[in-house]
Image (spheres, rainbow, N blue to C red):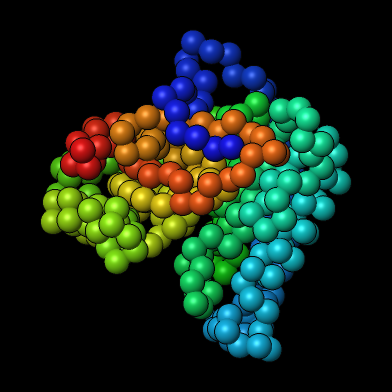
């Protein structure tokens, strides 16, 4: 199951990183192909409906059925190249997992992150490659805009170009993405604590907001209800660009995979920031 933890999500400087750059390159290559295959399916359905995706229309497939189709295609690509790996998908659950041992490599897929009644172009795909419980590669992709952000040890790229977070000099100049205050009591609390203390407030960016933070377009993302399969891909993207991502108490996040445990919904409260100083200021405001 997924849990909040004070244990380090990524290896500390004193630890040796378990995967070489060559191994990471191979994983990124597979991830690129698999994400593109899934994204092509989602884009096809999106464009066929004139950018309007009413899930209550009986003649239009629901977003969950489209996500399931895209997820199936992605899993096929992953296991074709990496048959020993295990996949956990939001729609399909565990694939290629016996449930008797803790897997070395797990891919975690959330292929339509941030949809509501209509599939708007602001949704995204969040994909993580987890090695021995630690997310080592993350991908956030929007097949509608064609923007793909990939994070790994020491670097994050956006459509192949290196990106870095950009700090604001003062908190009152920061661009911050939060959930709409009507979402739940934690969202309302976040809005009341931050909206009048930062420069600009944006709402419901979902995984795309983390990609924008990594590229320097936002300084903070505060989320109060992150589903586990949507979380793990965000971490390498933010950290690879030089940012900080923790829970609301400043604790780092970890995943203990288990095919026999249920996955809690909306279980994480997350703060991601461009730099340590900004992160500490947001944590202080939320305390």
In the picture, measured across the screen, residue 127 lies left or right of residue 212, that is: right
Q: Residue furthest top?
A: 14
Q: Is residue 283 left or right of residue 31?
A: left
Counting from the top left corner in percent of width and height, residue 256 is at 59, 31
The reply, left or right, for residue 32 in relation to residue 191 is right
Can you say which quadrant of the picture contains the C terminus?
Answer: top left
Q: Residue at x 32, y 39 (%)?
A: 248
Q: Could you tell me which residue is drawn at 17 percent across and 56 percent down?
A: 192
In this rendering, the answer to whether 161 lies above or below 124 is above
Q: Quadrant of the N terminus?
A: top right
Q: Residue at 47% across / 15% down in the picture?
A: 13
Q: Give the mark count.
A: 0
Nearest the eye: 47 or 66: 66
Residue at 49% across, 28% down: 9
Look at the picture and state if 115 lies above or below 78: below
x, y percent for residue 103: 73, 30
Q: Quadrant of residue 180?
A: bottom left
Residue 42 drawn above or below residue 76: below
Q: Is residue 49 visible in this depiction of the protein?
A: yes
The picture places residue 238, in percent across and down from the top left corner, at: 44, 40
Where does residue 106 sit, x and y in percent of width and height? 69, 37
Residue 151 can be seen, yes or no: no
């Amino acid at each position: 199951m997924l849990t909040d933890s004070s244990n380090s999500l990524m290896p500390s400087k004193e630890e040796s990183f378990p995967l070489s750059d060559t191994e990471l390159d191979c994983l990124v290559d597979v991830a690129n192909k698999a994400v593109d295959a899934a994204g092509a399916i989602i884009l096809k359905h999106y464009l066929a409906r004139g950018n309007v995706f009413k899930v209550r229309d009986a003649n239009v497939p629901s977003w969950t059925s489209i996500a399931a189709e895209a997820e199936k295609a992605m899993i096929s690509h992953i296991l074709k190249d990496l048959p020993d790996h295990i996949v956990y998908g939001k729609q399909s659950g565990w694939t290629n997992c016996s449930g008797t041992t803790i897997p070395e490599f797990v891919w975690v897929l959330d292929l339509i992150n941030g949809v509501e009644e209509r599939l708007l172009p602001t949704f995204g795909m969040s994909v993580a490659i987890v090695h021995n419980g630690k997310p080592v590669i993350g991908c956030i992709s929007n097949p509608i805009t064609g923007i793909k952000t990939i994070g790994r040890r020491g670097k994050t790229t956006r459509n192949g170009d290196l990106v870095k977070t950009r700090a604001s000099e003062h908190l009152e100049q920061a661009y911050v993405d939060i959930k709409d205050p009507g979402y739940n009591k934690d969202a309302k609390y976040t809005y009341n604590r931050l909206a009048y203390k930062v420069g600009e407030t944006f709402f419901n960016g979902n995984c795309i907001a983390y990609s924008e933070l990594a590229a320097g377009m936002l300084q903070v993302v505060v989320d109060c209800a992150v589903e586990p399969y949507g979380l793990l891909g965000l971490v390498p993207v933010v950290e690879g660009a030089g940012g900080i991502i923790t829970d609301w108490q400043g604790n780092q996040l970890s995943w203990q995979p288990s095919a026999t445990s249920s996955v809690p919904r909306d279980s994480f409260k997350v703060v991601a920031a461009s730099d340590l100083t900004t992160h500490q200021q947001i944590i202080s405001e939320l305390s």
